[in-house]
Amino acid sequence: SHNSDIEVFTERRVAKHTANAAYQVVSLPNGCDVGFVRHATNRRHFNVWSLKRSTGVATLVPNSLVIDTGPLNTPATNLMPHAAFSSDGQWGVVIARDTNPTVADRVIAFRTDASAPALDITATTPVSTTFFDGSCFFTSQFIVIGGSNGWYWTSASAPATLVALPVPNTTASNGVN
């Protein structure tokens, strides 16, 4: 079935193109399409790739290689499918998950036009062993992502190591607030 976002054809905003289940990409307003690929020759290798629509040239994003260390390596991709993108399409963030349960998740930020090496922005304090697919989002100034030890943030225009985001106590109470 064809369930693509109609904006995939206008190229005015970030839109997922899923017309072909084997070729799912995200179309971005900066003229690039981004996808997550598994290498044909080494099935343990995964990358982020970028396609410039104006030229038809596809490029692997430098430093985006993820190598799975698990015993079975069964998923179609170890790059989680719910990546987040800035509204202008210049930046993307994706969670890298290993099938080896002793290996902690990583968070990778990348320029969607593949013009610069991807950055590992995984939080180091406090450490989260798992980041939640679908919890990552961009605001106009920040990247925010949920992990097993809370919420984290970094700059949306110059991503660096994620830092803990203090969240107020939201416990329900019947008392006076």
Image (cartoon, helix red, strand yellow):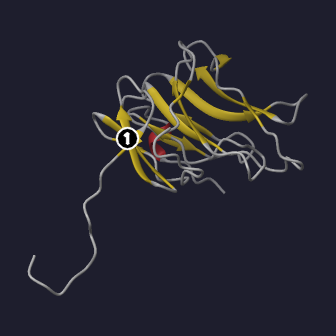
The answer to which quarter of the image holds residue 67 is top right
Front residue of 69/143: it is 69
Of all residues, the one furthest to the left in this rendering is 176
Q: Is residue 149 above or below residue 175?
A: above
Q: Position of residue 97 (x, y in %)?
A: 67, 45
Q: Label 1 belongs to which residue?
A: 153
Q: Is residue 36 left or right of residue 125?
A: right
Residue 79 horizontal/vertical position (percent): 66, 41
In the rendered image, the residue lying farthest to the front is 125
Q: Answer with left or right where residue 41 lies relative to residue 173.
A: right
Q: Residue furthest bottom?
A: 174
Badge 1 density bin: few <14, some 14–19, many ≥20, Cα 10 Å: many
**Residue 75 horizontal side relative to residue 33, left or right:** right
User: 147 and 30: which one is in front?
Assistant: 147
Indicate the quadrant where residue 38 lies. top right
The answer to which of 95 and 13 lies nearer the viewer is 95
Quarter of the image containing the C terminus?
bottom left
**Amino acid at circle 1:** Trp
Q: Position of residue 176 (x, y in %)?
A: 8, 81
As displayed, is residue 114 above or below residue 3?
above
Q: Nearer the viewer, residue 139 or 50?
A: 139
Residue 122, position as x, y percentages in the image: 53, 36
Residue ID at (45%, 27%): 91
Which quadrant of the rendered structure holds the N terminus? bottom right
- Residue visible at 78% across and 46% down in the picture: 76
Q: Secondary structure at mark 1?
A: strand
Left/right of residue 163 with respect to residue 99 in the rendered view: left
The number of discs equals 1
